[in-house]
Each structure stands twice: as C-alpha cells, then as structure tokens.
Image (cartoon, rainbow, N blue to C red):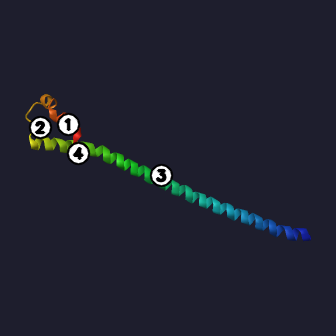
Amino acid sequence: MSLGTVLIVPFVVQIFAAVGIVGYLSFKNGQKAVNNLAYQLMEEVSDRLENHVHEYLETPQLINQINLDAIRQGYLNLDTPIDKRLSTQHYLGCGQK
C-alpha cells in the first residue's frame, strides 16, 4: 500500500461517517418537528370543532329555556293554536335576552 492510500482512506471514511451521522440526525429532528406540528394542528382543529359543536347545540337549549320562561310567566299559552302563538309579541323579542 502506498503512503497516499494509507493517509487518504481514513479521512474519507471519517468524512462519510460524519456526513451519514449528521444526515441521520437531521432526518430524525425533521421527523420530530413534523410530528409536533401535526399534533398542534390536530389539537387546534379539535378545539375549534368542539367550540362550533358547543355553540350549535347551545342555541336550541337557549330557545327551549326562553319558551319555558314564557310559559311560566304566562306569555305563551300552549292551549292557543300555533298560528296565533307565532303572531304574538313574545316572538318578536326573543333575541333580546
């Protein structure tokens, strides 16, 4: 073996090893970053969806509570036909509570 080969081969092996290790660590770090970002996105979408569903389901409950209050206060009589109930002043002010 020549002196050039003996000196060059170990350096080339060290360079390839260093490049391989840095590449592997970069790949793993990139995977962690992508997984973290995907988790944060899923959490945000989940929170927004939960808020929309909560708001959507809250409206009928509020309407039922308004109607119950109107019945208890005597503004809404269930014995009255529905077409007359819909024309009362009670429904004109429902959204003001």
Q: What's the amino acid at mark 1?
A: Gly
**Residue 73, percent across and down?**
10, 43
| Residue position marked by numbered label 4 in the rendering | 61
Q: Earlier in the sequence, mark 2 or mark 4?
A: 4
- Does 88 sit above or below residue 60? above
Q: Earlier in the sequence, mark 3 or mark 4?
A: 3
On the question of residue 1 being in view, the answer is: no
Q: What's the amino acid at mark 4?
A: Gln
| Residue position marked by numbered label 1 in the rendering | 93
Q: Residue at x 48, y 52 (%)?
A: 41
Using a 10 Å C-alpha cutoff, classify the residue at mark 2 as few (fewer than 14 neighbours), some (14 to 19) or many (20 or more).
Answer: some
Q: What's the amino acid at mark 2?
A: Leu
Q: Secondary structure at mark 1?
A: helix
Q: Are marks 3 and 2 in contact (CB under 8 Å)?
A: no
For this view, does 15 lie left or right of residue 61? right
Q: Are marks 3 and 4 in contact (CB under 8 Å)?
A: no
Picture quarter with the N terminus? bottom right
Q: Earlier in the sequence, mark 1 or mark 2?
A: 2
Q: Residue at x 48, y 55 (%)?
A: 39
Q: Secondary structure at mark 4?
A: helix
Using a 10 Å C-alpha cutoff, classify the residue at mark 1 as few (fewer than 14 neighbours), some (14 to 19) or many (20 or more).
Answer: few
In the image, which is nearer the foreground, mark 1 or mark 3? 1
Q: Residue at x 86, y 70 (%)?
A: 7
Q: What's the amino acid at mark 3?
A: Leu
Q: Secondary structure at mark 2?
A: loop
| Residue position marked by numbered label 3 in the rendering | 41
